[in-house]
Image: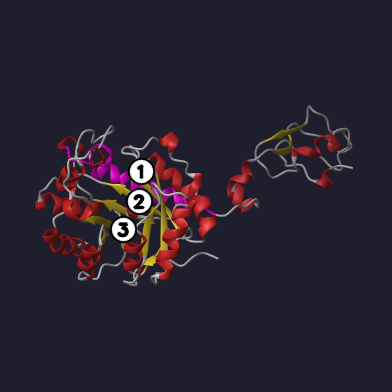
Amino acid sequence: MHPKFSIAGRSIGTEHSPYIIAELSGNHNGDLDRALALVDAAATTGADAVKLQTYTADTITIDVDRPEFRISGGLWDGRSLHELYQEASTPWDWHKALFARAKSHNLHCFSSPFDPTAVDFLAGFNVPAYKIASFELVDTPLIRKVAAQGKPMIMSTGVANYAEIEDALRAAREGGATEICLLHCISAYPAKPEEMRLGTIEALAKAFGVTVGLSDHTLGSAVAVASIARGATVIEKHMTLARADGGPDADFSLEPDEFTQLVADCRMAHAALGEPRFDRAGVGGTNATFRRSLYIVEDVAEGAVLTEANLRSIRPGLGLAPKHLPSALGKTANRTLKRGEPLAWDMFS
C-alpha cells in the first residue's frame, strides 16, 4: 500500500518519476532580476518545482550580541545569524513576481515558512504545498498551523531524532494534514557523501508509513541519483546561476546545466529500477538467441558416433543446452548430420 501524496495533481511516490525541487534559497544575491532568472533557469532543467524560503532576519532570529547567535566553523564561520539571514532572505514583496514567473512556466512554486506570519502571507498565494525546514521540525505549533492550511506538507528531518520526527508527524496529523512527505537530510553545508546514510530513506518509509525523499546538500549529483535506488520519491537540491557569483549557498548549489543533468539522471535511475524478473524476457529478450548451445561442427555420417571433434558448445543458442553435452557424446547419429546444424534430441540415439 503506497501512501497517497501529490502536489497540484502531480502524483508522487515510488511508482512515479521523482519529483524534483530546485531550491532557490539565498542564491538570488539580493537581486530580484537574478531571482527571476533563477526561476527561468529552473524551468529549463525539467524540474517540477522551485522553492523559496519565506522569512525575515527578525522573524527567524533576533539581532543580539551573544555567542550562541554567532556561527562557529563551516561555510559561514564568524557570521551572526541575523547578519546571515538578512543577506539570504527573499524579500516578501518579491514573492508575487516569483510565483507569477513560475506559473508562466507551468512550474510549481511553494515555500518554507519560518513563523506564523509567513504561513498567513503564503496562504494569500494559494500555494500548492508547504515545506517545513529541518531546523523548524521541532516547532510543533508552526507545524500545526501549516497543517491547518489543508495542503500537502514536506518536512525535512535533518537535525531531528526519531522521537522528534514522531512529534512532528503527530502535530501535522492533529493539525489536519493528510498528505505528508518526509525528506531525509544531513544538515551540513556542504554534506559529505560518506555521511549521508541513504538507507535512512527506506527506514523512514517503513517506520512512519509516509512518502519519503531527499534534501541533498552534497556537492554534485551522485548522492541524489543513488537515493532513487533507495526509494527517494522527492529530490530537493539548491540551484544557482553560477557558483562563481558567490552567495550564502553558492558553494553547494548546482548550476543550471548541472541541475539539468541531475533531473535527467534521477529520472533515468527511476526508469531503470523496474520489477525483478527472471524469465527469458526479463533477462535477455531476443538476444538469448545468441547464447551458447550444442551444434554439429563437422559432418557426421548416419550411425557414426558423436564426439568432441564433431559436437561442440558454440554460439548461437538454437541447439540443446550445453549441459546436455555429456549425455550426447558417445551416442550414434540417427541420420546424416551436417556441419552447422543445431543438435536436437531426435538426431541421436
- Residue 301, x across and y down, in percent: 83, 35
Q: Which residues are magenta?
A: 246-274
Callout 2: SS: helix
Please name the residue that numbered disc 1 is placed on. 187
Q: Which mark is residue 134?
A: 2
Q: Which mark is residue 261?
A: none
Callout 1: SS: loop
Coloration of the structure image:
secondary structure
Please name the residue that numbered disc 3 is placed on. 48
* Screen quadrant of the C terminus: top right
Cα–Cα span, label 2 and label 3: 21 Å
Mark 1 vs 2: CB contact within 8 A? yes
In percent of the image, x 26 and y 67: which residue is there?
127
Disc 1 residue crowd, few under 14, some 14–19, many 20+, Cα 10 Å: some
Residue 302 falls left or right of residue 295: right
- Residue 329, x across and y down, in percent: 85, 33
In percent of the image, x 49 and y 47: which residue is there?
200
